[in-house]
Amino acid sequence: MLAVAALGVILGLIGARSFVAEVDAHRLRGEDRWWDPRCPECASSLGVLLVRCREGHRQRFINVMILVLLPVLLASAAYWVPSLWVWPAYAVFVASMLLLSVADLDTKLIPNRILGPATLVGAVLLVGGWIFDMDAGSLLRALLGALAYFFVMYLLAVIARGALGFGDVKLAFLIGGFAGFISWGSVLVAGIGGFLIGGIVSVALLVSGKFGRKDSIPFGPFMAIGGVIAVVWGTAIMEWYLG
Ligand SMILES: [Zn+2]
């Protein structure tokens, strides 16, 4: 477990660089600069810590968050995954939750070029890991969980007419699948948790006056946080709730 956690830290530190580059490419809508994040001011490469460029311009705080959170997420996954065989799948899942959240906050869009590969690679790794340890979770429940969360969000998107993007609906499929692989409780926690956190933050923003009623608040990050909470603590939360 410790070895896998260490691997997670190393992958996280290395991966943070391409994460920042990817988010940057989205934000600036510039050319593809995978692995090579550039300074928006002078276009020179960023230093190892991602906090300054070669010319010394200070970079966004979100870079530091990525550099800290990605290794933490990947390493901690070694301790909460249902089986180490599915660690690669859940590593892809939590990494994509972080990347999609940052991209959504930046552009109010959930980019298909991240969501698509994350869903596909995550699913292949999940099936692969499950073959080695069939007690780790249930593929059927994963599929049903994905479809359940997807259809709930789809209905809400139809009712809300534009307030919820279709990106959120597709994101629900990914989250529902990884939560469902673990338990039905996790699926419930993912959905309810996302709305609870999103609702509380939205009300807080409205009350604080920083956001008006017409401003749209990206919902993806709340779903992503709900999804991560669900895969880590979902089963425990439901057991506690049901007494
Ligand atoms: Zn610079």
Image: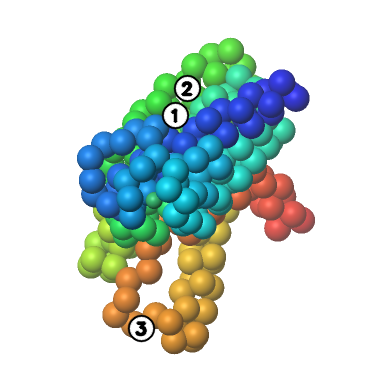
Q: Is mark 2 within 8 Å of ligand 1?
A: no
Residue receiving disc 3: 212
Q: Quadrant of the N terminus?
A: top right
Instruction: Place residue 130 in its image quadrant.
Output: top right
Amino acid carrying mark 3 in the image: Gly
**So how many labels did they put on this image?**
3
The residue nearer to you, when weighing 1 against 154, is: 1
* Residue at 59% over, 45% down: 69
Under tag 2, what secondary structure? helix
Under tag 1, what secondary structure? helix
Residue 88: image x %, image y %?
A: 54, 25
Residue receiving disc 2: 125
Residue 74: image x %, image y %?
A: 60, 34
Amino acid carrying mark 2 in the image: Leu
Foreground mark, 3 or 1? Answer: 3
The residue nearer to you, when weighing 108 against 22, is: 22
The residue nearer to you, when weighing 217 against 82, is: 217
Is residue 86 left or right of 37 when viewed as pictured? Answer: right
Mark 3 closeness class: few <14, some 14–19, many ≥20 residues within 10 Å: few
Residue receiving disc 1: 122
Q: Are marks 2 and 1 in contact (CB under 8 Å)?
A: yes
Amino acid carrying mark 1 in the image: Gly
Distance in Å between CA atoms under marks 2 and 3: 42 Å
Q: Are marks 3 and 1 in contact (CB under 8 Å)?
A: no
Distance in Å between CA atoms under marks 2 and 1: 5 Å
